[in-house]
Amino acid sequence: MAFEKLSDSIHELNSNVQNYMQSNSDYYKLKAFKSGMKGVTSLVRFLILISLVSVAGVLISFALAILISEATGIPSLGYFIVGAFYLVAAIVLFTAGKKPIEKFLLKKFSAIVFEDNEKE
């Protein structure tokens, strides 16, 4: 009788441990999915914002180039000036901007993904 009771207790313990492991596994899968989806939605939102700002930048650049061309009287000079500005900006960004941009993006996305840890 005692052996059967012990056997049942061990079987129940084994079943409870398996249920606990399954629940724990499901919880961490769900948590990883939630964090991943927050990161993905933030990335998509960021990419949409960047595309809209880029289109606006292109249109403003054309308008500025036309304005400079009309002011100088040389039709292509405005485009060369605006193009040179973007070339200089790209060179500065390429040489000095890697670390600050990396740092900014890492801070932004890690704050978005890991903000739930502070709430729990």
Image: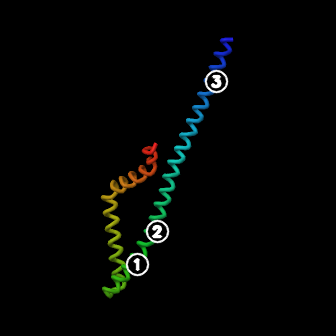
The kind of residue on which mark 1 rests is Phe
- Can you say whether 72 is above or below 81 in the image? below
Label 1 neighbour load within 10 Å: few <14, some 14-19, many 20+: some
On screen, 22 above or below 100? above
Q: Secondary structure at mark 3?
A: helix
Q: Secondary structure at mark 1?
A: helix
- Along the horizontal axis of the image, is 68 left or right of 120? left
Question: Which residue corresponds to the image point at 66% horizontal and 11% vertical from the top-left?
Answer: 2
* Element carrying mark 2: helix
Which mark, residue 12? 3
Q: Residue at x 45, y 45 (%)?
A: 119
Disc 3 to disc 2, C-alpha distance: 59 Å
Give the amino acid at mark 2: Leu
Q: Could you say where residue 61 lies in the image, as x and y percent from the top left?
A: 39, 75
Picture quadrant where residue 105 is located: bottom left
Q: Is residue 19 left or right of residue 113?
A: right
When asked about the image quadrant of residue 24, the answer is top right
Query: What label sits on residue 52 in the rendered view?
Result: 2
Identify residue type, mark 3.
Glu
* Nearest-to-viewer mark from 1 and 2: 2
Mark 2 surroundings: few (<14), some (14-19) or many (≥20) residues within 10 A: few
Please name the residue shown 34% across and 80% down the image: 78
Q: What is the spatial separation of the Cα atoms under label 1 and label 2, in whole angstroms?
A: 16 Å
Quarter of the image that includes the N terminus: top right
In the rendered image of this protein, does residue 114 appear above or below residue 44?
above
Circle 3 or circle 2, nearest the eye: 3
Residue 10 % position (x, y): 62, 20
Q: Earlier in the sequence, mark 1 or mark 2?
A: 2
**Are circles 3 and 1 on residues that touch, CB within 8 Å?**
no
The mark that comes first in sequence, 3 or 2, is 3
Q: Which mark is residue 62?
A: 1
